[in-house]
Amino acid sequence: MKELEGRIAFITGAASGMGRASALLMASEGATVIVSDINEEGAEAVVKEIEASGGSAVAKVLDVTKPDHVTACIQSVGDQFGRLDVLYANAGTPGATGSNVTQEEYDFSTGVNLTGAYFAAQAAIPLLKESKHTASILFTASTAGLVGSFLSPLYSMSKGGVVMLAKALALSLAPKIRVNVICPGPIDTPMLPKFWSREQQDGVEERLDNWVTNDIPLGRRGRPEEIAQAALFLASDRASFITGVALPVDGGFVAR
Ligand SMILES: NC(=O)c1ccc[n+]([C@@H]2O[C@H](COP(=O)([O-])OP(=O)(O)OC[C@H]3O[C@@H](n4cnc5c(N)ncnc54)[C@H](O)[C@@H]3O)[C@@H](O)[C@H]2O)c1
């Protein structure tokens, strides 16, 4: 029996990187995956990839910064399937770096990273309560939500908020819904170089390599598929006694 056989999993930011890898893996384990993203073409491409390997998926265009849009989108999944079994609120942005940001930059970062996560969970909870299983909410925060980021206080603040959101929801939603948060270290996705500012983009790969070599005990970047494995585990019944956990998947970065 596949691990997520017959389950409905809704993933935000699923057109690329960790969201895409998690969509592919969860679908290969039997879930029908709702591949949601602001990037419509990207979401449709992931759905095609899943279908080509015999899985089941639906694409949804979704801007997580718009609570009404998030609610309507998740509700449309409820209308179609009558329930949700897994919500993975993964969409995020590095946003502005440095400690001097405009109000617009502040609103953008908190809009994607915090508002997006909060309202996705709020909209999904009634549908997750309809699951025949112990339903699961996952978030993607960051190691920057566990320890301060030297690159962006704003990012650290928003991801720290996501960690606390997960822990608080784990308490209020037990025992029906388990809630956990994945805290990735540097993962090789299109986002990774964007944690450095525009002025630092020259030679960014070298900066990244230096950082990873010096500060990541396992001495390399992670792969999106390694985050997907953690997401699959936490979403599955193998993690049936795990809730309220902020799991670093970071090559040992926060062990220091
Ligand atoms: N890559 C890293 O090193 C790293 C480290 C720690 C945490 N993270 C977090 O991991 C998560 C996934 O990032 P990734 O590295 O896979 O990046 P990615 O850029 O590969 O994918 C992010 C996806 O989110 C989508 N997205 C962006 N804004 C959106 C919005 N408003 N509404 C809906 N979708 C939106 C993008 O279109 C994209 O498909 C993010 O929350 C990010 O903050 C990344």
Image (tube, rainbow, N blue to C red):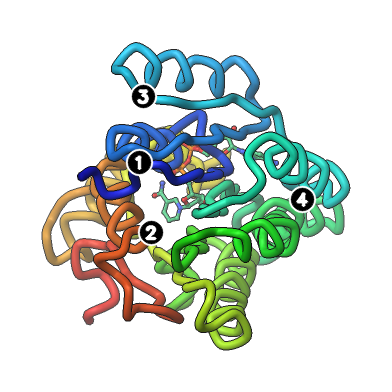
Q: CA distance from mark 4 to mark 3?
A: 34 Å
Residue 115 lies in quadrant: bottom right
Q: CA distance from mark 1 to mark 3?
A: 9 Å
Residue type at numbered disc 2 = Ala
Q: Are marks 1 and 3 in contact (CB under 8 Å)?
A: no
Q: CA distance from mark 4 to mark 2?
A: 29 Å
Q: Which residue carries the number 1 mark?
A: 26
Numbered disc in front, either 4 or 2:
2
At mark 2, the secondary structure is helix
Residue type at numbered disc 1 = Met
Kindly identify the residue that appears in the image at 33 percent across and 37 percent down: 30
Kindly identify the residue that appears in the image at 40 percent across and 39 percent down: 31
Quadrant into which the N terminus falls: top left
Question: What x and y, as percent, mark residue 164?
Answer: 58, 80
Q: Are marks 3 and 2 in contact (CB under 8 Å)?
A: no
Q: Which residue carries the number 4 mark?
A: 108
Numbered disc in front, either 4 or 1:
1
Any part of residue 141 in sight: no
- Is residue 126 found left or right of 97 in the rendered image? right
Residue type at numbered disc 4 = Phe
Kindly identify the residue that appears in the image at 73 percent across and 60 percent down: 110
Q: Which residue carries the number 2 mark?
A: 235
Question: What x and y, as percent, mark residue 35?
Answer: 54, 32
Crowding at mark 1 (Cα within 10 Å: few <14, some 14-19, many 20+):
many
